[in-house]
Image: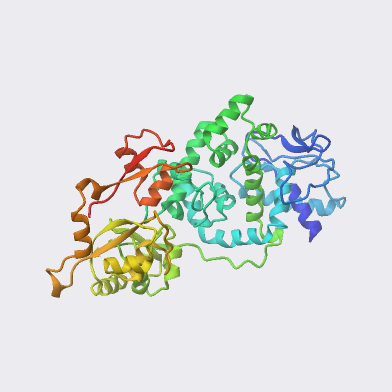
């Protein structure tokens, strides 16, 4: 098995791309350098923090060649030290790959020591992690491929989502990037992904893939190269622009050797290629017993404002976890209370039966009249807040959490629903809340003030108060997103 696995690594090559140069490590100087396939002398791209350095060995690189008809041909010469001495076995593997590779990849594929390194990394130390990636891939890859195809992009760019998040819609990075395509707030907003207190569309597999496709298309139009487009997707186009200008090259392998780009970005392209190679040949790399998830197929159905997800599950006759798995963008226990929402449900759902049952269920529920923000005080508890406004703890959690529990801390803004009075109590008023706000001015009811502290960002502030960034910018006449410690920002709040 080990021998066959090693052979398979040696037959991946270039369909197209920015350069045929290979990344190697200079053993004596312990730094990256660049060599042509004829000059390569073993090694890896940069030491990985969790893997031992591979032994240096002399060898050669090879690339996929295209003739004028676009047919793929495998070169006749390979490095004898990297291949088995058994020529018959080599020829057999070569003939198998010749049949497959011409139709397996629509992104540039380079095989070098850096790619070999991450193939080994994904199939050994990170084997369990990669197996989970493959398991989820079956659920999301079909719909993502279809979107990439519709947008006119190579479908194999889907493996960017694999190395970004492992196809986990709820992935969240230390840099506050979210979703399967790991959008930060500003880039997501630029490409139409809505983020507020109620939803985070960066987590929506369909909408985020559309946004990623359009972003990647813009990056390719800017750089003219999928390698540079992918690197820019990881680190940002401005940083890649500066590196290209500084070194006067658009060759990603050439740029990698300067160590100007962050380590994560220098490893990004080899990871992408390695992930694509394994994902397209999982059994050949030992991933034979994967419990693949079923492909995501769904209906889109519009539901009323503030519809509890539990009631949606009940009407669809499925469990709550299934509703959440189809709608990972919903952050609370209800759909947004300020707008109707398009929910996704399994394709097998009976539309008419669902609407009939949901209407019946909701007819017995109290109607939401409005809602208002509340800033948690030091002495507050969930019980105190619930009692103060005459609502149950369950309702409070439903509106402010994605589970049956809620954590509060001083300064956090949560939302309190106000319900319409029962038919028998048409004249009843919400006394507690009404009496409290009568003593406040109109401005105080509509605006809060936030003094910017070190480490604050507009996105963080918007999440804290449940309002979008654009509203904060508009109210404070901010042209960009830079804020400074000591600034006082006005935070717009909805009328109650």
Furthest residue to the front?
379
Question: Which corner quadrant holds the C terminus?
Answer: bottom left
Is residue 74 in view from this perspective? no
Q: Is residue 203 left or right of residue 362?
A: right
- Asked if residue 15 is positioned above or below residue 383 in the image, the reply reads above
Q: How is the image coloured?
A: rainbow
Query: Measured from the top left, where is residue 472 in percent x and y?
Result: 33, 42
- Of 443 and 45, the residue lying toward us: 443
Residue at image location 66% in from the left, 59% down from the top? 282
Residue at image location 36% in from the left, 61% down from the top? 343
- Of 358 and 226, the residue lying toward us: 358
Query: Measured from the top left, where is residue 401 in percent x and y?
Result: 40, 63
Query: Measured from the top left, where is residue 382 in percent x and y?
Result: 37, 66
Is residue 238 in view from this perspective? yes
Question: Which corner quadrant holds the N terminus?
Answer: bottom right
- Asked if residue 383 is positioned above or below residue 489 in the image, the reply reads below
């Amino acid at each position: 098995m080990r021998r066959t696995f090693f052979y398979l690594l040696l037959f991946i090559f270039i369909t197209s791309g920015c350069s045929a140069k290979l990344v190697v490590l200079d053993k004596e100087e312990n730094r990256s350098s660049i060599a042509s396939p004829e000059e390569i002398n073993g090694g890896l791209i940069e030491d990985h923090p969790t893997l031992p350095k591979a032994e240096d060995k002399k060898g050669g690189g090879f690339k996929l060649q295209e003739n004028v008809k676009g047919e793929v041909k495998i070169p006749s010469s390979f490095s004898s030290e990297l291949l088995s001495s058994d020529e018959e076995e080599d020829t057999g593997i070569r003939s198998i790959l010749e049949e497959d590779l011409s139709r397996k990849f629509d992104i540039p594929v380079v095989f070098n020591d850096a790619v070999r390194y991450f193939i080994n990394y994904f199939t050994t130390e990170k084997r369990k992690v990669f197996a989970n990636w493959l398991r989820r891939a079956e659920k999301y890859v079909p719909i993502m491929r279809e979107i990439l195809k519709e947008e006119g992009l190579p479908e194999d760019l889907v493996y960017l989502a694999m190395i970004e998040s492992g196809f986990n819609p709820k992935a969240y990075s230390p840099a506050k990037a979210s979703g399967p395509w790991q959008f930060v707030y500003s880039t997501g907003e630029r490409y139409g992904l809505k983020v507020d207190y109620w939803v985070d569309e960066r987590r929506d597999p369909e909408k985020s893939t559309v946004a990623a496709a359009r972003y990647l298309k813009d990056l390719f139009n800017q750089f003219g190269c999928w390698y540079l487009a992918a690197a820019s997707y990881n680190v940002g186009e401005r940083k890649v622009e500066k590196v290209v200008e500084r070194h006067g090259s658009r060759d990603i392998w050439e740029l990698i050797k300067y160590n100007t780009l962050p380590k994560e970005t220098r490893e990004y392209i080899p990871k992408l290629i390695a992930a694509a190679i394994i994902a397209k040949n999982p059994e050949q790399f030992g991933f034979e017993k994967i419990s693949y998830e079923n492909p995501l197929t769904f209906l889109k159905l519009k539901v009323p404002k503030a519809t509890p997800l539990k009631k949606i599950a009940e009407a669809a006759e499925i469990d709550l976890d299934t509703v959440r798995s189809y709608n990972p963008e919903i952050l609370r226990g209800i759909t947004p209370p300020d707008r109707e929402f398009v929910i996704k449900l399994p394709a097998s759902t009976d539309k008419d039966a669902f609407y009939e049952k949901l209407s019946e269920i909701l007819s017995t529920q109290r109607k939401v009249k409005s809602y208002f923000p509340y800033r948690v005080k030091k002495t507050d508890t969930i019980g105190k807040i619930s009692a103060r406004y005459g609502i149950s703890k369950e309702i409070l959690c439903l509106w402010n959490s994605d589970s049956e529990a809620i954590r509060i801390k001083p300064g956090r803004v949560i939302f309190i629903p106000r319900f319409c009075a029962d038919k028998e109590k048409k004249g009843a008023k919400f006394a507690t809340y009404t009496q409290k706000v009568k003593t406040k001015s109109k401005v105080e009811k509509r605006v809060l003030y936030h003094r910017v502290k070190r480490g604050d960002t507009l996105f963080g502030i918007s999440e804290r108060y449940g309002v979008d960034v654009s509203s904060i910018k508009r109210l404070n006449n901010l042209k960009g997103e830079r804020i400074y410690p000591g600034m006082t920002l006005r935070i717009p709040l909805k009328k109650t």
